[in-house]
Image (cartoon, grey):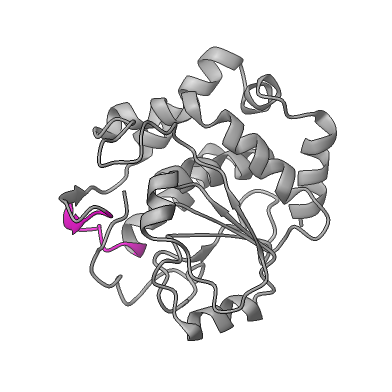
Amino acid sequence: MTDDLPDREPDLPSAFLDIPGVRNFRDAGGVGALRTGVLYRSGSFHNLTPEGAQRLKDLGLRTVIDLRSPFELATWPDLRFGLDHEALSLPTLPANREDIDRPWPEDQAELYPFMAETAGPSLVAAIRRLGTPGGVPAVVHCAVGKDRTGLTIAVVQSLLGASEAELMADFLLSNAGLGLLDGPTPYLDETGTERVSRPISAPLLASSLSWIRARHGSVTDYLRAHGTTDEELTALRTNLSA
């Protein structure tokens, strides 16, 4: 599920940071009460360069949360170049078997509710880490930082009081960050198979959040149902809020 896409657009919003070898890297802060400089989002680090690693070091990076599948990690592992952050593998989607089969829907309209259904354990573990003293600054990433990362960051931002409009505006920045403003783009995935990367839209994220609310009432209750405690939610807000 790793998109090998063309270079991103030259004029991007100020949230984007140039980390050589990493796609779609930007600050998730400034949304709701989430402060800047503590939580970033991006694509994978499998093409990270030494210069990019130095820039991550300059950010004070302490944690990298990788939402990809075990097969993706084994095929295209993140590079470190001596970085001493803690790396956590927290797959958003359930594993099937380590081959080219995909255990998740290819259709975006089906994928987003499916992610909401399966992401609970990953989200809970991410929230625990982000609320840990010394756990930030942190980066959350998947393959290109668009779908799995989009949902994870939206959940965190919602816990920090972001409005629906703020969530959607930040979510949609990935279209600019990945050169998808003009429509779908072909790419080679981690198996060498040609696929198509499609732009994201507000209704996609809305469908994930609607699934959560329809079954649990709120994002907070969804997380509680998967094991998050009120103390962990308070720690998250304390660690990340402005």
Would residue 39 be seen by someone viewing this image from the given angle?
A: yes
Where is residue 185 shown, x and y percent of the image?
A: 17, 56
Q: Residue at x 19, y 56 (%)?
A: 192
Does the magenta-highlighted stretch encompass residue 185?
yes
Q: In the drawing, does residue 116 fall left or right of residue 128?
A: left
Residue 226 in the magenta stretch? The answer is no
Rendered position, 28 above or below 214: below
Q: Residue furthest top?
A: 215
Split into 4 quadrants, where in the image is the C terminus? bottom right
Asked if 199 appears above or below 61 in the picture, the reply is above
The quarter of the displayed image where residue 104 is located = top left
Where residue 30 appears, as percent x and y from the top left, is: 62, 58
Residue at (74%, 53%) from the top-left corner?
240
Q: Nearer the viewer, residue 188 or 167?
A: 188
- Tell me: 124 left or right of 6: right
Using the rendered view, name the quadrant where residue 158 is placed.
top right
Dominant SS of magenta comes to loop
Q: Residue at x 62, y 75 (%)?
A: 83
Is residue 168 visible to the viewer in this orientation of the structure?
Answer: no
Percent x, y of residue 54 = 57, 83
The span shown in magenta is 177-190
Residue 70 to residue 240: above or below: above
Q: Position of residue 12 (x, y in %)?
A: 39, 71
Residue in the foreground of this view, choosing between 69 and 56: 69
Q: How many marks?
A: 0
Q: Is residue 67 above or below residue 137?
A: above
